[in-house]
Amino acid sequence: MSIEKLSASAIVLLKKLIETQSFSKEEDSTAILIEGWFVENKIPFQRTKNNIWATNKHFDETKPTLLLNSHHDTVKPNSAYTKDPFKAVVEDGKLYGLGSNDAGGCLVSLIATFAHFYAQENLTYNLVVVASAEEENSGKHGLNSMLSIIPKIDVAIIGEPTLMNLAVAEKGLVVFDAVIEGTPSHAAHPNTSNSIYNTIEVLQWFKDFKFEKTSETLGDVKMTVTQINAGSQHNVVPAHVNLVIDVRVNDAYSNQEIASILQEKAPCTKITPRSLRLNSSSIDLNHELVKAGISMKRKTYGSPTLSDQAVLSCQSVKLGPGDSTRSHSANEYIYVSEIEEGIAIYIELLNRVIV
């Protein structure tokens, strides 16, 4: 099939995906659509829960393996939508609809790219494509659950909207729950250890604290207090205040190191990480994928946003059509031309690396 026909087929699939609800953990119907696309294109595939995956026809266990991955789940549409989020409409070259940009355009482009190379012989890499579930909620039945099922991966391209530039590093994430204690009392009585007042200095500490190590590609670790909760009655000083802290981790630290630093230094009664598994990720700038991308005039940068790269232990690059700033926005869209260009760039990139 020509690249033009592959692009047209991918766009038809994307329109169907947009018009089919696929919130995280509820991707059954979009999984069926993706299955149908593989059947139509005569490509054998497997399904594990709501993850659809396939390997190239001439898979050779002696060769390294390249993963092509993006997700078909979406967040829920926000209240600011003025268009029907489940209606695929093209206006002025823009394809509107929930999940069009994040990450439907990337997904159908990678599937089309896989189809282009599926039957080719003598590739230097095997190809595995995974259309994964539960990315938006970092769920337990997403890409992370597939790593023990699919062949061992040596390097990966993760499809997320990057304007087809190379995100050669990505920040990890650790969410902490913290507690600040004080003395509970009646509001009418003196209290020299009001837990809410005690929080003022703690909040200032989190605002001012800087992690020492910076990263050439990802910059500084970014720490943000995002939630605060305390009290239940107007006349009762609460015994404690609960905080939630969002920490975006650069590649100079492991998540465990971040946790150890905060548990040692943060002026809280208790601070506990929810999970340490969403690590920062990167790829060697001398890797042939990166060098090929640079030779194609694609820019490189470090990404502040989290993706399924976080669950991989191998090197990976984030690359896809669309613009990250449109993700999770009202009236989400992707340009049709971005998908067509994305497929062409993916194919040219792999032609320089695996053919």
Image: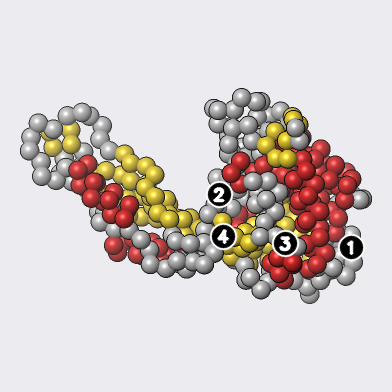
Q: Amino acid at mark 4?
A: Gly
CA separation, marks 4 and 1?
A: 33 Å
Q: Which mark is residue 297?
A: 3
> Where does the image place residue 18, in percent across and percent down from the top left?
71, 35
Q: Secondary structure at mark 1?
A: loop
Q: Which residue is mark 4?
A: 302
Sequence-first tag of 2 and 3 = 2
Sequence-first tag of 4 and 1 = 1
Front label number (4 vs 3)? 3
- The residue depicted at 55 percent of the width and 45 percent of the height is 137
Q: Secondary structure at mark 4?
A: strand
Characterize the local packing of mark 2: few (<14), some (14-19) or many (20 or more) Cα atoms within 10 angstroms.
some
Q: Secondary structure at mark 3?
A: loop
> Where does the image place residue 86, in percent across and percent down from the top left?
68, 29
- The residue depicted at 70 percent of the width and 60 percent of the height is 298
Q: Amino acid at mark 2?
A: Ser
Q: Amino acid at mark 3?
A: Lys
Please tell me in which quadrant of the rendered image residue 21 appears: top right
Q: Is 252 placed left or right of 133 in the picture?
A: left
Q: Nearer the viewer, residue 306 or 187?
A: 306
- Whether 183 is drawn above or below 285: the answer is above
CA separation, marks 4 and 3?
A: 17 Å
Q: In which quadrant will I find the C terminus?
A: bottom right
